[in-house]
Amino acid sequence: MAIGWANNLDLLAQSGVLDFDAPAYVLGQPARYVGNPGPVNPLYDNPPRVPGFEQPKADEFKPSQNNNLVKTPAWKKWLFGLITTGALIFTGFKFRSRLLPFAKQIPSKVSNFVSNGWKKLAGLFKKKP
């Protein structure tokens, strides 16, 4: 259950959705009120304590010890890698007529971009007459 579940049920009772002390009923405790209570302030009223809910002594991370997780076998990983590599190679051969001209233009485009960017940056610091 969420930490503020008792306050949420008290707010439902205050709004008229519930007509009894639901947290006390769930925990088997005597009812604190019957019907719709007055304004319930979750900051000042003490909701029932949840049994077995303990805060950690120090701030630490404890990984879950769930051994029911499915481990992917190594052969599936290798097969996926081979299929992916094969798909990339096939795509490269299929579209090489489009990729080669584009790849030859990359160095000139990069140098133009860098030189134009440098000129714009240097132009910001020049004094205008």
Image: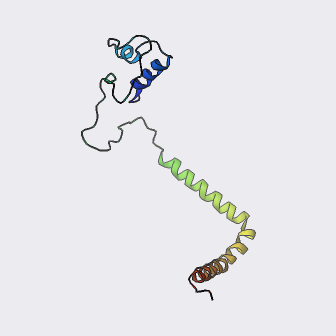
Where on the picture, by quarter, is residue 94?
Answer: bottom right
Outermost residue, right side: 97
Above-or-below relation of 51 to 68: above
Which residue is painted at 69% across and 77% down in the image? Answer: 105
The residue most toward the left is 57
Quarter holding the C terminus?
bottom right
The residue lying at 67 percent from left, 74 percent from top is 103
* Picture quadrant where residue 10 is located: top left
* Nearer to the camera, 109 or 15: 15
On screen, 52 above or below 118? above
Q: Position of residue 23 (x, y in %)?
A: 38, 18
Q: Position of residue 113 (x, y in %)?
A: 64, 77
Q: How is the image coloured?
A: rainbow
Determine whether, in the image, residue 25 is placed left or right of residue 118: left
Is 39 in front, or is 43? 39
Residue 76 left/right relative to 20: right
Residue visible at 66% across and 75% down in the picture: 106
x then y, percent, for residue 64: 36, 38
The quarter in which the N terminus is drawn is top left
Q: Nearer the viewer, residue 55 or 48?
A: 48
Which percent across, then down, holds residue 9?
Answer: 44, 21
Q: Is residue 28 above or below residue 47?
A: above
